[in-house]
């Protein structure tokens, strides 16, 4: 199975960036690379199920290349070093990039993380509005860090909710 997107490993979390063509998936991946994270795939992500995990990788012909509108094709290891790329990684989180439009509603609290089915597995998903001058790499990195923290215990939203409910 293949999907149109970009796959980046952020703080040991495999983040699959999805969205329509031209929304900024590759630019977000490049920003994450400059922040010290690793590119796995750009444009085409091959998916393979491994038990209860979904593994993503780039097709061999385009592995470690990234296309940035206005610049063209870049070879990431040449620009950022061999540590800036990975051959494959498990996909832990989906980030759907969407052009922000009037009337679009986005999560404001985050008590529950919705899931989306990909490759026969339900994966947590966040929808992120793309706005001018937004640093999506920083937001995606925060989403990956939050995903890791949720695996360890209650989310920040749940802890704040408990404070308002009179708990700790």
Image (cartoon, grey):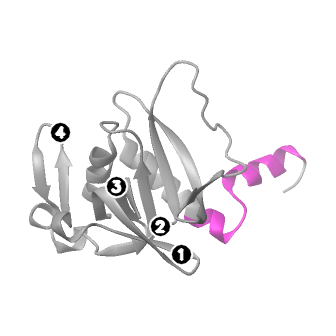
Please tell me which of labels 2 and 1 falls first in the chain.
Answer: 1
Q: Which residue lies furthest to the right in this view?
A: 166
Specify the quadrant that holds the N terminus.
Answer: bottom left
Closer to us: 3 or 42 = 3
Q: Position of residue 90 (x, y in %)?
A: 45, 72
Please tell me which of labels 1 and 4 falls first in the chain.
Answer: 1
- Residue 36 appears in the picture as rendered: no
Residue 56 drawn in magenta = no
Cα distance, mark 2 to mark 3?
Answer: 11 Å
* Residue placed under numbered mark 2 in the picture: 91
Q: Position of residue 137 (x, y in %)?
A: 37, 48
Q: Residue 6 — which label?
A: 3
Cα distance, mark 2 to mark 1?
Answer: 7 Å
Q: Identify which residue is drawn at 45% across, 46% down.
A: 139
Locate residue 126 relative to residue 3 in the image: left or right.
Answer: right
Q: Quadrant of residue 63?
A: bottom left
Specify the quadrant that holds the C terminus.
Answer: bottom right
- Most prominent secondary structure in the magenta stretch? helix
Cα distance, mark 4 to mark 3?
Answer: 15 Å
* Residue placed under numbered mark 4 in the picture: 69
Please tell me which of labels 1 and 3 falls first in the chain.
Answer: 3
Residue 161 drawn in magenta = yes
Cα distance, mark 2 to mark 4?
Answer: 26 Å
């Amino acid at each position: 199975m293949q999907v149109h997107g970009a796959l980046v490993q952020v703080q040991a979390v495999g983040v699959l960036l999805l969205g329509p063509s031209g929304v900024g998936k590759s630019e977000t991946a490049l920003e994450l690379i400059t922040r010290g994270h690793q590119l796995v795939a750009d444009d085409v992500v091959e998916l393979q199920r491994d038990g209860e995990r979904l593994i993503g990788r780039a097709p061999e012909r385009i592995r470690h290349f990234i296309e940035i509108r206005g610049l063209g094709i870049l070879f990431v290891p040449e620009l950022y070093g061999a540590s800036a790329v990975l051959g494959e990684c498990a996909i832990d989180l989906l980030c759907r990039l969407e052009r922000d439009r009037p009337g679009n509603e986005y999560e404001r609290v985050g008590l529950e993380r919705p899931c989306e089915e990909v490759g026969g597995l339900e994966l947590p998903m966040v929808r992120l509005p793309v706005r001018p001058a937004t640093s999506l790499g920083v937001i995606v990195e925060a989403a990956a860090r939050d995903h890791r923290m949720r695996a360890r215990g209650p989310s920040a939203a749940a802890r704040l909710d408990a404070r308002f409910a009179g708990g700790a």
